[in-house]
């Protein structure tokens, strides 16, 4: 496990520092996504796993365990567990959202069908639980099974919040915690627990993951209106076209006058979008500082993530995690 990674982006530096653990995790993933009787399972899974992605969630598990001095191999199985849970939720999300693209490639439900995507997602959840049980830790099993339940809860909450102009920042935060931050937090916390870290260190890791996940999602929501399609697998305005009540929209609606509110009622609540509406939405956000407010919130949560690392031991991996929190919001600075 080499830690000398000068000149690399923080996410790439973390991958380089944990290269041997990542290789071991990839071997577990290949082994566990195989199916003797249903070849479509590895086909669908390989399509999504092979599309790349930053692997941030399993990286957090590996880094947390190593940072806390772990020398076994259960952290590798837990990292694979986290990746399986994440991949399963992506397969299900693409069906729910009727998505056609994921990480710049056609979605599995487009290439195969919705039924295959749902059932393969279910299979990956089952594989994840098998890996969890294999660690022999009821505490870890509780952390990751709770996370799986909260992810599903967050997705259902998002359904009720979508296209509803009454959605508040508090509800938005609950959605973000469910759909994104919960798995970040559980990934970090499980790594600390399997390493036998102290309670304050495990809590620090959990808070770090939670805050990092919130910042990560807020940046994505910001970039949908304020940035280019820079490899996050989205195009400018995707959230607007899907009528999602993300933080930039919530802030703009909260400050809207009657004419502006009528615009949001038509485009988001009713879905009657016309040519030029995206540009008008971005102009309204600029007028009321909605993007700036989203940017400030993301920076604040990244700062909370970095502060949460205080109880953790001095270690090159701690520096990598600190850099990662800064990097997540670098695109909005």
Image (cartoon, rainbow, N blue to C red):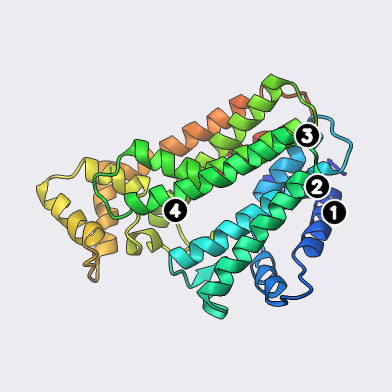
Q: Residue at x 83, y 48 (%)?
A: 21
Q: Position of residue 163 (x, y in %)?
A: 28, 55
Label 1, residues with CA under 10 Å away: few <14, some 14-19, many ≥20: some
Say which quadrant the N terminus sits in. Answer: top right
Given residues 20 and 131, the one toward you in this image is: 131
Asked if disc 3 and disc 4 are in contact, CB closer than 8 Å, the reply is no
* Residue at disc 2, secondary structure: helix
Instruction: Give the label on residue 193, or none.
Output: none
Tell me the distance, in whole angstroms, between the alpha carbons under discs 2 and 4.
32 Å
- Quadrant of residue 251 within the rendered picture: top left
The residue shown at (88%, 39%) is 72
Mark earlier in primary sequence (2, 1): 1
Query: What's the CA distance linking mark 4 and mark 1?
Result: 34 Å
Front position among marks 2 and 4? 2
Of the numbered discs 4 and 1, the one sitting upstream in the chain is 1
Badge 4: residue crowd in 10 Å (few <14, some 14–19, many ≥20): many
Which label's residue is closer to the chain start, 3 or 4? 3
Query: Are circles 3 and 2 on residues that touch, CB within 8 Å?
Result: no
Identify residue for label 4. Answer: 223
- Horizontal placement of 33 versus 54: left or right? right
Task: Please give the residue where the numbered disc 2 appears in the rendered image.
Answer: 76
- Residue 62, image x, y percentages: 76, 42
Query: Separation of disc 2 and disc 1 at Cα?
Result: 7 Å
Expressed as whole percent of the image width and height from the top left, the position of residue 164 reads: 26, 51
Q: Earlier in the sequence, mark 3 or mark 1?
A: 1
Q: CA distance from mark 3 to mark 1?
A: 17 Å
Q: How far is mark 3 from mark 4, CA to CA?
A: 36 Å
């Amino acid at each position: 496990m080499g830690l000398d990674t000068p000149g690399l982006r923080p996410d790439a530096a973390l991958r380089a520092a944990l290269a041997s653990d990542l290789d071991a995790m990839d071997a577990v993933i290949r082994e566990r996504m195989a199916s003797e009787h249903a070849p479509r399972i590895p086909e669908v899974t390989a399509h999504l796993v092979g599309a790349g992605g930053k692997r941030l969630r399993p990286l957090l598990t590996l880094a947390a365990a190593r940072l806390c001095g772990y020398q076994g191999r259960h952290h590798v199985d837990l990292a694979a567990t986290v990746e399986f849970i994440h991949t399963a939720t992506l397969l299900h999300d693409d069906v729910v959202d009727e998505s056609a693209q994921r990480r710049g490639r056609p979605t599995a439900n487009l290439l195969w069908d919705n039924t295959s995507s749902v059932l393969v997602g279910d299979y990956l959840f089952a594989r994840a639980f098998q890996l969890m049980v294999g660690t022999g830790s009821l505490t870890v099993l509780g952390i990751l099974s709770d996370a799986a339940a909260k992810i599903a809860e967050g997705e259902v909450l998002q359904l009720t919040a979508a296209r509803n102009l009454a959605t508040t920042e508090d509800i938005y935060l609950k959605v973000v915690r469910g759909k994104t931050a919960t798995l970040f937090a559980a990934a970090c916390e499980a790594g600390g627990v399997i390493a036998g870290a102290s309670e304050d260190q495990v809590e620090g890791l959990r808070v770090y993951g939670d805050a990092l996940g919130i910042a990560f999602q807020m940046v994505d929501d910001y970039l949908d209106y304020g940035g280019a399609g820079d490899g996050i697998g989205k195009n400018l305005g995707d959230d607007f076209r899907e009528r999602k009540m993300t933080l930039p929209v919530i802030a703009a609606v909260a400050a809207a006058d009657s004419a502006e509110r009528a615009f949001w009622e038509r485009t988001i609540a009713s879905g009657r979008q016309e040519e030029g509406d995206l540009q008008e939405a971005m102009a309204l956000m600029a007028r009321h500082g909605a993007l700036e407010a989203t940017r400030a919130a993301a920076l604040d949560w990244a700062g909370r993530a970095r502060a949460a690392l205080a109880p953790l031991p001095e270690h090159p991996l701690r520096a990598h995690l600190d850099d990662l929190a800064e990097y997540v919001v670098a695109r909005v600075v």
